[in-house]
Image (cartoon, rainbow, N blue to C red):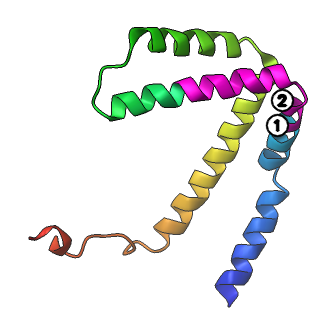
Amino acid sequence: MEVYDRAHELARALSRSNEYSDFRLARAKLESNPANLNMLRDFRRRQLELEMTVLSGKEPDPALKQAVEESYRIISLNPSITAYLAAEERVARLLADIQKILLDAIPEWGKDMGGEFDKK
């Protein structure tokens, strides 16, 4: 049970971290302005549509590419949105770093067993 106790300690530390606190404040500020929130949602919707098109192997519509670029240009000028995105990135980086630390502690996890899974 010690591992679970430590995981709960980590969860509490994360919830009290500066990164998460900054994220919550930036999110609250963003959500207080519906126009900014809709602008970010629209950008992410278009961005996802563009990414899905590319991942499916299709050539993206030039109008969609231009719309994504224009949306990005507009939101990058908005301090509330850029603060939110920066805070979101810091939390994501923190979580990725923690995941790497955990996975480095158990190096055998996820390794292929001598190519056995690839054999037909």
Secondary structure of the residue carrying numbered label 1: helix
Residue 76 visible, this angle = no
Front one among 39 and 98: 39
Specify start and end residues of the magenta stretch as a single range: 28-46
Amino acid type, callout 1: Arg
Q: Position of residue 27 (x, y in %)?
A: 82, 37
Give the residue at mark 1.
27
Q: Position of residue 114 (x, y in %)?
A: 17, 74
Image quadrant of residue 13? bottom right
**Residue at 85% in and 57% down:** 16
Image position of 33 with respect to 18: above or below: above
Image quadrant of residue 38? top right
The 10 Å Cα crowd at callout 2, few under 14, some 14 to 19, many 20 or more, is: many
Tell me the distance, in whole angstroms, between the alpha carbons under discs 1 and 2.
Answer: 5 Å
Q: Position of residue 58 (x, y in %)?
A: 29, 26
Left or right, 32 with reference to 43 = right
Front one among 114 and 25: 25
Task: Indicate yes or no whether the magenta region holds residue 70.
Answer: no
**Residue at 30% in and 20% down:** 59
Pointers 1 and 2 in contact (C-beta within 8 Å): yes
Image position of 17 with respect to 81: above or below: below
Amino acid type, callout 2: Leu
**Residue at 16% in and 70% down:** 115
Task: Indicate yes or no whether the magenta region holds residue 39.
Answer: yes
